Amino acid sequence: MNAIELLKQQHDEVKKLFAQYGKLPDHADVRRGELFEMIADRLAAHATIEELYFYPATRSERTEDELREAVEEHLSAKRIIADLLEMEPGDEEFDPKMKVLQEQIEHHVKEEEGELFKKVRKLLSKEQLEDLGILMEQQFEELMEDEPRNNVPAETGHAAPL
């Protein structure tokens, strides 16, 4: 799978999880916690493969601004996830923080899919995108084995380097 298609697939998966979260009844704290963990793990692993592989491979004069903004958006999302990790799903601030996280992720996805990916398609060949996608998918699967959300609090000091 090429890198862009992999990232889009992951965007769609998280979007569906947020939709499930939004439909939960008020007293479904256990399910809320489970969905948060699924979302946080996927976002943490996704951000990691973007920061380690996709962004460096696609960095150019053409993409520099989008990439700098993207790592700042990642940092903001990581800070919210770190806050949520310290809370219980029944806390009154939990749902509002989840809503803000969802809105930030939706904004980030819209920019990546609407602007960055178009530039990347012109920058990298199909073969390069395929090779990058294979590497990123393998790394994502490895990260998902170890609850990657638990690494997020250590990544909230500053945006990832490009």
Image (cartoon, rainbow, N blue to C red):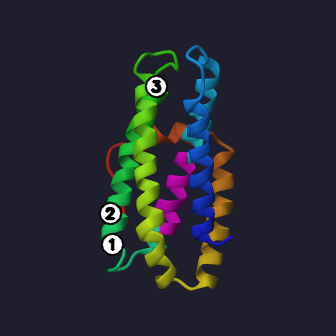
Which quarter shows the C terminus?
A: bottom left
Rendering quarter of residue 17: top right
Mark 2 near mark 3, Cβ–Cβ under 8 Å?
Answer: no
SS of the residue under disc 1? helix
Mark 1 near mark 3, Cβ–Cβ under 8 Å?
Answer: no
Mark 1 near mark 2, Cβ–Cβ under 8 Å?
Answer: yes
In three-dimensional space, the C-alpha distance between marks 2 and 3, rounded to whole angstroms, equals: 29 Å
Rendering quarter of residue 161: bottom left
In this picture, residue 130 sits left or right of residue 160: right
Residue under pointer 3: 95
Asked if the stretch drawn in magenta spans residue 50, the answer is yes
In three-dimensional space, the C-alpha distance between marks 1 and 2, rounded to whole angstroms, equals: 6 Å
Q: Position of residue 52 (x, y in %)?
A: 49, 63
The prevailing secondary structure element of the residues shown in magenta is: helix
Disc marking residue 64: 1
Q: In terms of depth relative to the viewer, which is nearer, 23 or 140?
A: 23
SS of the residue under disc 3? helix
Badge 2 crowding class, 10 Å Cα cut-off, few under 14, some 14 to 19, many 20 or more, is: some
Return the disc, 2 or 3, that comes first in the chain's sequence: 2
| Amino acid at the residue labelled 3 | Asp
| Amino acid at the residue labelled 1 | Glu
Disc marking residue 68: 2
Point 46% across, 25% down: residue: 95
Magenta region: which residues?
Answer: 43-54
